[in-house]
Image: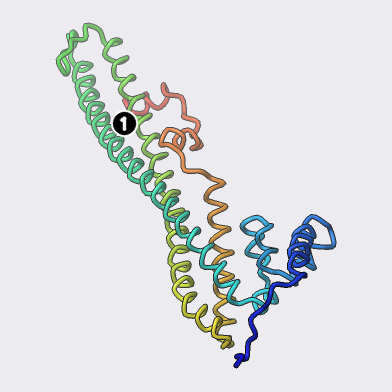
């Protein structure tokens, strides 16, 4: 006794079906054919487009026509997005650690340079108050003339200001990295939330029991994928760079003349 579904016999139309499939694919490159392909075979339509266009290709009508196909596509794409987000977060986290170390090391140099300057200024003022202040001994070196010691002070002053500028730039770069990390981590949370809903909805759709809840989930998944893809595109358009590259890219403030700054330093209390 035959069941309700008769086994399909080989048909002379099988080769014709292959030809029809090829023709549908070729319609992609024909101006008016893209719309036909979109409605006749939404799954094939999406494969012909770029990543973000693939996602947009599954419009509401296409999703309703092929919920299982859409959800399986979404799951694969979102897993790829998750891997990409993880890679970007790892790269930025490594840069953040390096930038944090640079800031801490530079902060120590700023403190050391300022400490030396204060000691040198004190020695300079004491020597100036004496009739025979020179030669002057400082930090294991002897300075026979005021001009020589003053030049040493100016050199230390320049180093101090340079370290201060580097520290400010390092902190600014670290803040920028933190903002990017927060944005990526927020997208990762939203992506994981949407991804967790896919498998149960695939099972429902495969059982031909598609409901408004499945449609709502597909809409949520669609928005999560688009938002994540746009975030990834923006992050990859601004690639993860080395510390040297980050520092070079910072806008360096034009320093005021060192002679004026140094004179103000000497005159300050």
Quadrant hosting residue 9: bottom right
Who's the residue at 77% across and 70% down the image? Answer: 13
Percent position (x, y) of residue 244? 42, 33
Q: Residue furthest top?
A: 144
Q: Which residue carries the number 1 mark?
A: 268
Who's the residue at 28% across and 10% down the image? Answer: 148
Q: Does residue 162 lie above or below 12 as drawn?
A: above
Percent position (x, y) of residue 187? 48, 63
Task: Name the foreground residue: 178 vs 253.
Answer: 178
Q: Does residue 1 lie above or below 48 as drawn?
A: below
Q: Is residue 166 visible?
A: yes
Who's the residue at 38% across and 50% down the image? Answer: 90
Task: Name the foreground residue: 171 vs 110.
Answer: 171
Task: Name the foreground residue: 58 vs 103.
Answer: 58
Q: Does residue 235 lie above or below 244 as drawn?
A: below
Task: Name the foreground residue: 258 vs 198.
Answer: 198
Percent position (x, y) of residue 150? 30, 15
């Amino acid at each position: 006794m035959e069941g309700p579904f008769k086994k399909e016999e080989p048909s002379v139309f099988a080769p014709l079906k292959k030809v029809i499939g090829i023709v549908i694919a070729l319609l992609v490159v024909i101006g008016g054919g893209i719309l036909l392909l979109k409605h006749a075979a939404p799954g094939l339509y999406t494969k012909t487009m770029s990543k973000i266009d693939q996602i947009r290709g599954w419009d509401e009508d296409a999703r309703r026509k092929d919920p299982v196909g859409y959800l399986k596509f979404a799951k694969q794409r979102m897993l790829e997005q998750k891997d990409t987000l993880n890679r970007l977060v790892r790269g930025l986290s490594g840069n953040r650690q390096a930038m944090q170390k640079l800031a801490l090391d530079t902060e120590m140099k700023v403190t050391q340079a300022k400490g030396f300057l204060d000691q040198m200024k004190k020695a300079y003022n004491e020597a100036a108050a004496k009739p025979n202040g020179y030669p002057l001994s400082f930090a294991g070196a002897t300075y026979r003339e005021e001009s020589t010691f003053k030049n040493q002070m100016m050199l230390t002053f320049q180093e101090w200001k340079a370290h201060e500028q580097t520290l400010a730039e390092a902190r600014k770069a670290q803040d920028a990295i933190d903002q990017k990390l927060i944005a990526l981590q927020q997208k990762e949370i939203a992506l994981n939330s949407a991804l967790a809903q896919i498998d149960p909805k695939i099972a429902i759709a495969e059982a031909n029991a598609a409901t408004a809840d499945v449609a709502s989930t597909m809409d949520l998944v669609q928005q999560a994928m688009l938002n994540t893809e746009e975030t990834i595109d923006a992050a990859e358009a601004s690639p993860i760079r080395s510390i040297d590259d980050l520092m070079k890219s910072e806008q360096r403030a034009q320093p005021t003349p060192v002679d004026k700054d140094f004179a103000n330093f000497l005159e300050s209390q």
